[in-house]
Image: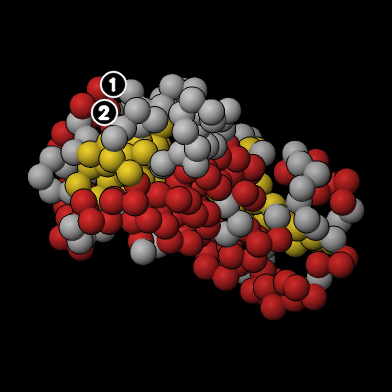
Amino acid sequence: MKNKENNELAVCGFEAVKALVKEHKENIRRFYYTRDRMMAFKDLFKYLAENKIPYNNVSEGELEKLCGSVHHQGVVAMIRTPRILPLDTDITDEWVRNNESAVVLDRVGNANNLGAIVRSAAFFGFRNVVIPLDEAQTSITTSSYRVAQGGMEYVNVYSVKSIVKLLSAMKGKLVRFGTDVEAKTSVRDIKKLAGGKGSIIVLGNEENGISEQVKKNCDELVIIPYGQKKSSRRIESLNVAQAASIIFYEFSN
């Protein structure tokens, strides 16, 4: 939940806030907790007091109002609304030099899916997540922060105006993978196809997948093999966050 007047975002959920405190406590502007969470954050209180940052023991109802969710798990940290940096050539050149990989989301509109993808990206060591400046694409929200379970502290989220232009610029520099339910190449081959090079993996939304223009600018299109014959399966595709976990696993192992 955003507080537009104060330019703040509520971070809630025990694991998300714990990671925030561990990695970026300097971003905290206000801190609220229930009595049963006091001991878990007692070391933080000295820092907050020394830096004159307000912190208060409040009711669960107050926490719900602050973050707009019943899933606060007894703690809410208010941070400055995260600024998503625009991706530029200095950053992508560094990816190429360091053999880094990135995941690009093509209009993934559900905040919970974004959070789950970020969680998996952090777990498997993908440090870079790119989202388009598109009204169909969700951005960083209280919900995505909570679902990421601390993953937001371990990834860099960038924005681009055009995924197609990004992929075009990365031709021959990074291996560009797209996901497609009609692809012939199994995701099991993704690590071999990457050949040890940094890569870009594009994930599409569940309704339409990645766009045709994006597909045309990928080096390889991959599919997660079905567990049954096409004629007998009842589910066409996985949730995008589930698919992301499988792809990251295959790429990393």
Quarter the N terminus occupies: top right
Q: Quadrant of residue 124?
A: bottom left
Near-viewer residue (244 or 108): 244
- Residue appearing at x 55%, y 47% in the figure: 116
Find residue 157 and report its horizontal and vertical position in percent: 41, 47
Q: Secondary structure at mark 1?
A: helix
* In this view, 95 is above or below 170: below
Q: Is residue 39 left or right of residue 240?
A: right
Residue ID for mark 2: 215
CB under 8 Å between discs 1 and 2: yes
Amino acid under disc 2: Lys
Give the tally of numbered discs: 2
Q: Which mark is residue 64?
A: none
Label 1 and label 2: CA atoms lie apart by 5 Å
* In this view, 209 is above or below 3: above
Near-viewer residue (112 or 139): 112
- Residue appearing at x 58%, y 28% in the figure: 234
Q: How is the image coloured?
A: secondary structure
Quarter the C terminus occupies: bottom left
Q: Is residue 203 left or right of residue 116?
A: left
Q: Which mark is residue 212?
A: 1
* In this view, 218 is above or below 46: above
Q: Is residue 244 visible?
A: yes
